[in-house]
Amino acid sequence: MSVHEHKQKKQSVNCVVITISDSRTNETDKSGNLMVSLLENAGHRVERKEIIPDESSAIKNMLDSCCENPDVDVVLTNGGTGIAYRDVTIETIQSMLDKELTGFGEIFRMLSYQEDIGSAAILSRAIAGVSNHTVIFATPGSSGAVKLAMNKLILPEVAHVVTEVKKDLK
């Protein structure tokens, strides 16, 4: 089966959306709400949405809980990816990955560069990978970054990535 044929098998995946922020609330979580909307519009299920502080232990505990749940296929985070001392999302997630999808961050930065962000794209940190047979995507917290990552990278590939990750479990 070709990659194109493989990707044509549309499937719904179970997702958890996590906003990592010390200041956002459910009412002001534009990026988390955008993720939920885009996932649901694409036919995926959002099992839950959470806002947690930008603290390594909170991120690790939430991801451990999601990755231990066999009903969760994908965890999508937004926020906490900057270069300030307090931004610990990337380091925390990277330490938890069994496999990293390095192309995600590379292509995200390339697309960001091309989308009028220019050389400031070097400041943009995003990561994806697999932990305990669960796919994790971490994007910056701006709604522009979420929209770009979701529409150009995550939504076109998420079902395919989950199929690949889960095929060893069958």
Image: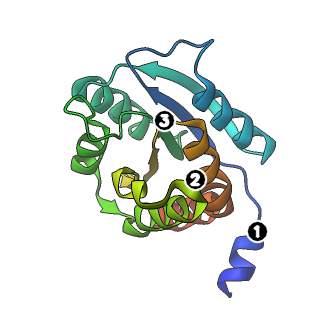
Q: Which marked residue is nearer to the observer: mark 2 or mark 1?
A: 2
Looking at the rendered structure, the secondary structure element under dot 1 is: loop
Q: CA distance from mark 3 to mark 1?
A: 30 Å
Q: Residues within 10 Å of mark 2 (few under 14, many from 20)?
A: many
Q: Residue at x 37, y 67 (%)?
A: 102
State the image quarter where residue 40 is shown: top right
User: In the rendered view, does 66 fall on the left or right side of 170?
Assistant: left
Q: Residues within 10 Å of mark 1 (few under 14, many from 20)?
A: few
Amino acid type at circle 3 is: Gly
Pick the front one: 21 or 72? 21
Residue at horizontal 41 percent and vertical 54 percent from the top: 120
Q: Position of residue 117 (x, y in %)?
A: 51, 54
Q: Is residue 170 visible?
A: no
Vertical relation: 51 (above or below) 162? above
Q: Which mark is residue 126?
A: none
Q: Position of residue 168 (x, y in %)?
A: 45, 67
Q: Nearer the viewer, residue 9 or 137?
A: 137
Q: Quadrant of the N terminus?
A: bottom right
Question: What is the number of the mark on residue 149?
Answer: 2
| Residue 123 in sight | yes
* Residue 76 position within the rendered picture, expressed as x and y whole percent measured from the top left: 51, 41
Q: Regarding mark 3 in the picture, which secondary structure is present there?
A: loop
Task: Determine whether the residue tagged by mark 2 lies in a helix, strand or loop.
Answer: helix
Please tell me the numbered disc located at residue 9: 1
Amino acid type, callout 2: Ala
Residue 161 falls left or right of residue 2: left
Which residue is found at the position 57% from the left and 25% from the top?
49
Looking at the rendered image, the disc whose residue lies closer to the viewer, 3 or 1, is 3
Residue position for label 3: 141
Marks 2 and 1, how far apart in space? 22 Å
